[in-house]
Image (cartoon, rainbow, N blue to C red):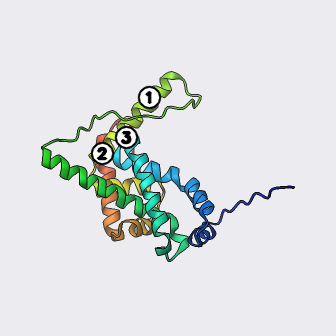
């Protein structure tokens, strides 16, 4: 008896199957998009543990609301929009809590780094870790809008139109925010990275 392994690469087909109640299809969507969504959230919040929790929450929300998705070819954009909204809710809650208790969020909070054996020499690994930490700190200095656009455009290669769908902002605002974010990142990382 042979077992047939089905490989589905068409996202629209997977979304349709999910909407029909196929949980395995949703698992395949999770496998496909969990890393990009986790990366996006991590770049927004700067904390690996929080990012993992928010990624899971984003997928729970996506699963619960999958039937509201009208254009299955826009699943990725829709999912990033859910992730963005999940992050915004947490950041807003943190800001309100900090205001209530008079606390400030430190930019030098330790960032957990997942160092993997990439074949780099120890000095190259150290430099890479330092650059990642500098990048994360620089991202956290950007306003939430600028950070969102910068991350979606440069790290996730979203088009202006896709970013507009994710955020609800005009393409003009997105281009202006991206320009300002690049200037700020260049200023923050001057001597390390050019954008």
In the image, residue 134 above or below residue 8: above
Would you identify the image quadrant in which residue 5 lies? Answer: bottom right
Q: Which mark is residue 127?
A: 1
Disc 3: which residue: 135
- Residue 179: x and y in percent read 33, 57
The answer to which of marks 2 and 3 sits earlier in the sequence is 3
Question: Is disc 1 placed on a helix, strand or loop?
Answer: helix
Disc 2: which residue: 140
Question: Is disc 2 placed on a helix, strand or loop?
Answer: helix
- Mark 3 and mark 1 in contact (Cβ < 8 Å)? no
In the image, residue 13 above or below residue 193: below
The answer to which of marks 1 and 3 sits earlier in the sequence is 1
Q: Hey, which residue is sitting farthest bottom in the picture? A: 70
Q: Nearer the viewer, residue 59 or 124?
A: 59
The mark lying in front, picked from 2 and 3, is 2
Q: Nearer the viewer, residue 26 or 143?
A: 26
């Amino acid at each position: 008896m042979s077992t047939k392994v089905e490989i589905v690469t068409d996202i629209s087909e997977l979304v349709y199957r999910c909407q029909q109640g196929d949980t395995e299809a949703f698992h395949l969507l999770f496998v496909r998009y969990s890393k990009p969504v986790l990366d996006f959230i991590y770049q927004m919040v700067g904390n690996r543990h929080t990012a993992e929790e928010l990624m899971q929450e984003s997928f729970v929300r996506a699963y619960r609301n999958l039937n509201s998705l009208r254009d299955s070819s826009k699943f990725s954009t829709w999912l990033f929009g859910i992730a963005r909204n999940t992050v915004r809710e947490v950041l807003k809650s943190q800001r309100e809590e900090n205001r209530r208790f008079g606390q400030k969020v430190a930019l030098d909070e330790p960032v957990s780094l997942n160092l993997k054996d990439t074949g780099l020499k120890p000095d190259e690994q150290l430099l890479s870790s330092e650059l990642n930490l500098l990048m994360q700190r620089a991202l956290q200095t950007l306003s939430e809008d600028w950070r969102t656009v910068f991350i979606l455009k440069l790290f996730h290669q979203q088009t202006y139109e896709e970013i507009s769908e994710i955020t609800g902002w005009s393409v003009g605002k997105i281009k202006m925010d991206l320009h300002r974010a690049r200037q700020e990142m260049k200023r923050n990382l001057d001597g390390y990275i050019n954008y």
